[in-house]
Amino acid sequence: MASDILKQTYGLDGRTALVTGGGSGIGKAIAGYLAQSGAKVIIAGRRADVLEAAAAEIGHGCVAAPLDVTDIAGLPAAEATIAERFGTIDLLVNNAGNTLKKPFEDSDMADFDQVFDVHVRGALELTRCVIKRLLAEDRPGSITFISSMTAYIGQPLVHGYTISKTAIDGVIRGLSAEFASRGIRVNGVAPGWIDTDIFRKATDGDPARKQKIMGRIPMQTLGTPEDIGWACAFLAAPAAKYINGQVILVDGGGATGF
């Protein structure tokens, strides 16, 4: 009985999920837990070899699809191809990300665009394509954006990332209000300091920065990609059917810690 209740509450059987940047790190973990929860999962990105290897490792019928979120003009055709091959996307996780560590005074608009195109412009256009199809087919859906605790606290040298993630929180509020009555929930997960390649890129060679980070986390440990994966699987599940317009901080208390 307990297993049946859990399956009904947290299971994703019959749903099709697309995870951008799903070939490694947080995206791979998200895809893995969505697949374990019963969803048919598509991982998307630019590196075909990385995606294929990740799909094989995730198993549970996970498949790979080429997608470049910075190719804004090409996203409608890419979404249509994915939907034709694998079915309408019910669950979208906008996870694809990058970062640039650079002093503000040495930065220019091209630097900001490099990050903004991935986190905001590409995610917005892909989301628009997915929502249009859901509405046309009168299907419910769940959209999850990966935000960041950087949207809540100031961190030096990663201004493009901070601006992008702060914008994403605004996107979540706006879209959640617009589409909730039409059966589409929009939420976010804001990772704290997670042990990923992006984190290492931001902290390698900067021991003072890393020490400051660790001193801020009450749990005294970095998070793992799996922590974010479970949060995303929860938001996609029936258990979260009344959660809308929220950003869940998964940060070990870092945003509020001392």
Image (cartoon, grey):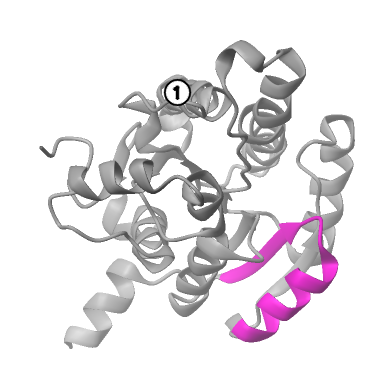
Q: Residue at x 62, y 28 (%)?
A: 120
For disc 1, the marked residue is 166
Q: Residue at x 21, y 52 (%)?
A: 252
Mark 1 closeness class: few <14, some 14–19, many ≥20 residues within 10 Å? some
Q: Residue at x 83, y 38 (%)?
A: 76
Vertical relation: 157 (above or below) 232: above
Residue nearest the viewer, comparing 244 with 218: 218
Tell whether 121 sits left or right of 40: right
Tell whether 120 sits left or right of 161: right
Give coordinates of residue 71: x percent, y percent.
85, 36
Look at the numbered disc 1 and give the secondary structure of its residue.
helix
Residue 187 quadrant: top left
Image quadrant occupied by the C terminus:
top left
Residue nearest the viewer, comparing 152 with 76: 152
Q: Is residue 242 visible?
A: no
Give coordinates of residue 70: x percent, y percent.
79, 36
Instruction: Tell me where the magenta segment starts and ends, as one range.
Output: 40-57
Q: Residue at x 46, y 79 (%)?
A: 36
Q: Is residue 97 visible?
A: yes
Q: What amino acid type should be assigned to the residue bearing mark 1?
A: Thr
Residue nearest the viewer, comparing 101 with 185: 101
Residue nearest the viewer, comparing 26 with 221: 221
Give coordinates of residue 110: x percent, y percent.
77, 19
Residue 230 quadrant: bottom left
Vertical relation: 254 (above or below) 53: above
